[in-house]
Every structure is written in structure tokens, then in C-alpha cells.
Amino acid sequence: MLSIKNLKVNVDGKAILKGINLEVKAGEVHAIMGPNGSGKSTLANVLAGRDGYEVVGGEVWFQGKNLLELAPEERAREGVFLAFQYPVEIPGVSNVYLLKAAVNAVRKHRGLGELDAMDFLSLVKDKMKLVQMNEQFLYRAVNEGFSGGEKKRNEILQMALLEPALGILDETDSGLDIDALRIVSDGMNALRSAERAMVLVTHYQRLLDYVVPDHVHVLVHGQIVKSGDRGLALELESKGYGWIESAAAGA
Amino acid sequence: MGIAVNTNAVIETKDHYAAEFERVAAALTGHMSPWLRDLRRKAINHFQARGFPTQRDEEWKYTRTAAIEKRNFSCDPGDEFAVDMGRMEELLRVEAAAQRLVFINGRYFPALSRVDALGDGVAAHSLNETLHQRPEVLEGLLGSVVDMDRHPFAALNTAFADDGVYLSLARGTVVELPIHVVFIATAAHDGRASHPRVMVKADDNSRAVLVERHIALDDAVYFSNVVSEIALGKNTAVEYYRLQEESAKAFHISGVHVHQERDSRFEAHTVTLGCALLRNDVDVRLAAPGAHCSLNGLYLVNGRQHVDVHTRIDHLQAHGTSNEFYKGILDGHGRSVFNGKVIVHPDAQKTDARQSNKNLLLSADAEADTKPELEIYADDVKCSHGATVGQLDADAVFYLRSRGINEATARNLLTLAFAREIIEQVKVPALRSYLDLAVMQRLPQGAWGEDQP
């Protein structure tokens, strides 16, 4: 589904990703872990098409399409979803408007009819149960005044509505208390399916207790230095990143 | 050499309006009232002595009026013109069901007006009719709020004004229905100046909602020189909406002059959507303790338009509050000026004055100048001000795009959201939905999809 080949990315002329290779198949959940500044969020943002990242080498294929050639909105419509590390507050735009516009943009692209207000509302209410959000969130401005946990739940709600083929979750667990983490990860688990892949970008292994990954990759200094199964995450939890960083430096 | 030519031009223009005055003065309604004749004479002398402002004048530093000056607009009041009633009704959508006074090219137009449901205690008439029938009610009132020394164009207006609105609220009168006043310019107004005058007198404990719209049917080149005077008695509340949507080639200079007595509340919402050159002064005197004003505004500036907003709030007595919030959206080569002056006089202890001006630049060629000016002569006051000039939040644009919304729509949506913070405060439903639509239609990123917010 997603094939990243030797991806090299600069930010402000500085090499951040130095040749990433990653294959993600439908139904798989991959966790990308790494210390701060290793390039985890850069990878997530480049996949979603954010400005300010210069791809200087390599390629990314998503379901047979050259992902890097697509505008961010085209990627979204093709089925790539980024859950933001810091969801943006948008005063003056109601959450329900954003959700409906997004759902209909994606449906239109997929050749499905747009939903009218009634159908949309019953769909969104159904999906909101997944992340235990109540209806008042619909009528508030997007993320404005939301707590950290509410923002992350709102991201998962968007993912549930857009039904992407690939969900990239950028530190969706960071800053959450245990209850919020449980709600968010229950949401993620409910969205796991044989057709859908997920890439979880995280600093902590805690999330992986709830959302158990098929594969774990460790990103250090812009390169994947080690890949393994869930056991690798547990090893990182007990030993920290130090040993793997020095191993990477020594290699 | 260049200076000499310039000076000549100024003299000629001053002379133009003086000559226009000599030509039309005797035909102005109310000419038979000595007090009015004197007031007009004084006003034209005032204007002639002062002349058009130059950029050396601090209050006009960023706005050149030379384009108005050189056109020598005719001030002839009594022109005949054909009126297409169908097009007019279409233009009056906002006022479709409203109590309204309609003016075409500066003249009251009874066939489109109706003020039959306002109830007792309200006089809502054309100024012209009032000057004909009972000019005495205006004696000592007309010109009592505006300061002609500070506002040269108000002097010019005073010299020529013989139509507009006289609205009087008797003590304790509460008018539930908004009163709409609409000034329409048509093609026949090309090359002409109009000097509409709105005079509002709200006696103690009265309340009313007034909507003043300046709109155009065709793209004529004309000069609207408007003065609105609003005098609020004790414990009154006036909600005032002002929509400036002139022809793209027109010049509009206007002043809203407000006097407030004890515990009165004045709330103004000024939206500017169109004009070649527009200057709007809002000048409020909180003359007695406990008076409150809020001034909200939104201006959309595009092409080569120039919009200049000057507000001045004088806190003269204690416990006054003022709240000012203006926003601007600039595109193309548009230029805006916001100058917000707040003066807290020595007796105005416990004043609470807040001001904010935010400008959104959609194009690299647009320019917004913003200048808060606080002068504080009392020591126990709360004053705050903030001014910003910025672009759309790139993170927000990306966030929306990452949800499948195309870039143009994302930018439109964020621009509209910026404007809505002002529009949402409009409490007259027909006006609010009109503004929402009007702003949406002016968004620069092209047409919306079928799914409008």
C-alpha cells in the first residue's frame, strides 16, 4: 500500500531524513519510534504534503500513485490521513462544517454522492460514540478551546469519518492522561481493519500497550536503524534510546 | 513650479464649491429660515477658509483627496431622473419587509419608502420634508453634535444639505422594528455630489435600531459626502448599523458624530464593501458618567480601493466604557488606514477603554496601516489596544487541505471566518445574512462549491 524508498528530506537546507525505506501493507500497523529530533514528525508531515520540507531524494508510492506529486488535499482524497501532533485551532469555522466539507470532498472523489445535512448528522453522531464525544463539539469552532485530549479525540473522529486507507498518527498519544489515552486508542483499534494500514509515530511505548503494532521501527538521526516486532518497543521501554543511538553512531 | 500649479488647483476647487454654493443656495430647502441660511453660510465660509485637506494635515496623512478635488462635482440638488422600480426593489432586498426611508441620488423617494409601523413617539421623516414643514425642530439641533472645525467635509455637507433623515424619539419611546435608511446612487448621479444628512435625536430612556445603507445601482463616478449626527439622551440605547457599498468608482466621505448623555449605550457596526476612495470618521463624545459605546467594523478592500477609518472616542466623564473592534481584509493593491484615537479626559476616572484592529492581507501588494492613539489624562483607568497585520495562518490552511478541502476553499473559509467575527455581532437577521453572502461573494479565491458554510 505504502512504499517509501530511500526518502531524503531537507528542512532549511539541513538533512533531516537521510534515506528512509519502509513498506506498509494493508491491514498492518507500524509504529515508528525514536528520540526527539530523529525525524519522526518530518516523515509524517512529508507524507501528508506539508510545505517547508524539501524532498531531495527517493520516492513514495501509495496504492500505485506517486504520492509526492499530489497536493495535500489530493492525498487526503486518495486515502491518506494525518492525525496532527498539534491539531490547529480555527476560530470562526465550526467543527461540523469542517467535518461535512471534508467528508463530502472525499466522497465526491470516490464517486459517491455527497451527504445531505440529515444523513451527515446521523453518520457523525454514530462515529462520535467511538471517541465518546458529545454533540456540542460539533457546533464549536474547530479545536478552539478544546483540551489536549479533546483535540486528539477530534482527530480520531475525523479519521473515522474519512475512512482513509492509510492513517498516519503523529504522536497522538502525547500529552494525554490515561483515560484520554484509553479512549483514543480504543478509537484507533476500532478503526483497524484488513483494508486499512496505520503508521503510529510515537515517542513512548505506552500507546503500544493499547494499540499493538505488527512492526516497530526505530528512527535515529533520520534513518531507520532497527526494525522488529512489538518486543523491540518493550526493549526500548526498559533500556531507553541511548543504546540504540550509540549503536547507530558506531555503525 | 509644480507647487504653484498645485496651489492654483486648490484655490480653483475651493472656489468651485463656493461658486456652487452661490449658484444653488437660494434653491436649497429651508433657505427662508434665517438660522439655517446663516448656518449654511458659516459652513461654506468655513470650508472655503480651510480647503481640502492635504497630507500635511495629520488627520489626512494617508489619504489624498486630490481625486475628489479635481473632479469639481456638481452640487445641484434638483435633478429629474428615471427610476426602474423593479431594479430598486431588487436592490432593497435587505429592507424588503422593513420600515424604510429610501433616497435616490440624495433625494427622498417616497414611492419606495414606508414608515407606518413605528408606533407613537417616533418621528421618522425626510429631512427635506421637515425643513419644509417644521424647520424649527431642527434649529439648534442640526450641527449641534458635529465639530466642523475638525471635519472640513462636514462643513461642506452642512453648507449644502437639504435632504436626509430626521429621526426623533420622544422620551421613553422604544422602537422595536429597525429603521432602515437607504441611499442609492444611480447612473444619473454621475459627476454629482450629494450631501445627505442624518439627524437622530433620542430623548431620555428611548431605544431604537437604525440601519444606514449606502449603495449603488450602477458604476457611476460620484461623491457622497455624508454626515450623521446622533444625540443620545440619558439612559438611551441606539444600535446603529452602517453599510457602505458604493459604486467601485465612487468617492465617499462620511462622518458619524455621536453625543452621549448619562448611562446611554451606543453600539455601531460599520461594514465597508465598496468604493474607489472612502473615508469614514466615527467621532463619539461620552459626555456624561456611565456612558458606553462599542464600535465594530469590517472593511473589505480590493483592486486599487482605498479605505480610511478614523475613530475618535472622547471619554469626558467617569465610569465610561468603550469597546472598539475593527477588522480589515485586503486584497489586490488595496490600501487601508485605521486610526483609532481614544482620549481619556481628566474627569474620566474609572474609564474602561478597549480597542483592537486586525488586518488580513491576502495579497503581497495590499497595504494596511493601523495606528492606535491613546491619550490618557486620568490616573485610574483601564485602557488596552492591539493592532495586527498578517496573512492567513498557513497551519490552518494545511490542516483544512489535509482533510481533503481544496486550497482555494480552505483560504475562502478562513477568510470568511475572519470576517464573521464581526458579522456575527449584527443583530438584524436580514442584514446579517446579506452581509454573510456579500462577503462570501467578494472572497478572492473564486466561486464556492455547492457546499457553502
Image (cartoon, rainbow, N blue to C red):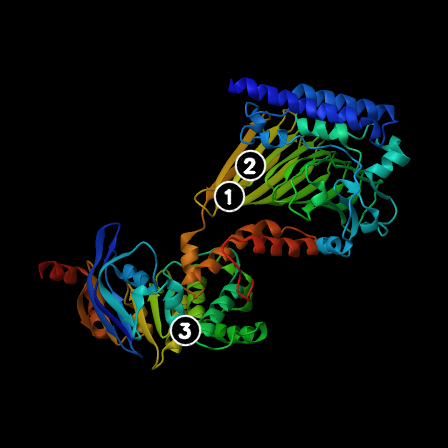
Q: Is residue B215 above or below residue A116?
A: above
> Does A24 sit left or right of A192 as displayed?
left
Q: Is disc 1 in contact with disc 2, using a CB cutoff of under 8 Å?
A: yes
Dot 3 alpha-carbon crowd within 10 angstroms: few under 14, some 14 to 19, many 20 or more = many
Q: Which label sits on residue A187?
A: 3
The total number of labels drawn is 3
Local secondary structure at mark 3? helix
- Residue A207 location in percent, x, y? 32, 69
- Classify mark 1: helix, strand or loop: strand
- Residue A40 is drawn in which quadrant? bottom left
Amino acid carrying mark 2 in the image: Phe
2 and 3 marks on the same chain = no
Q: What residue would you read off at disc 1?
A: B359
Instruction: Depth check: give the residue in front, A119 or B438.
Output: B438
**Residue bearing the label numbered 2:** B338
Badge nearest the viewer, 2 or 3: 2
Mark 3 — on which chain does it sit? A
Is residue B429 visible in the rendered image? The answer is yes
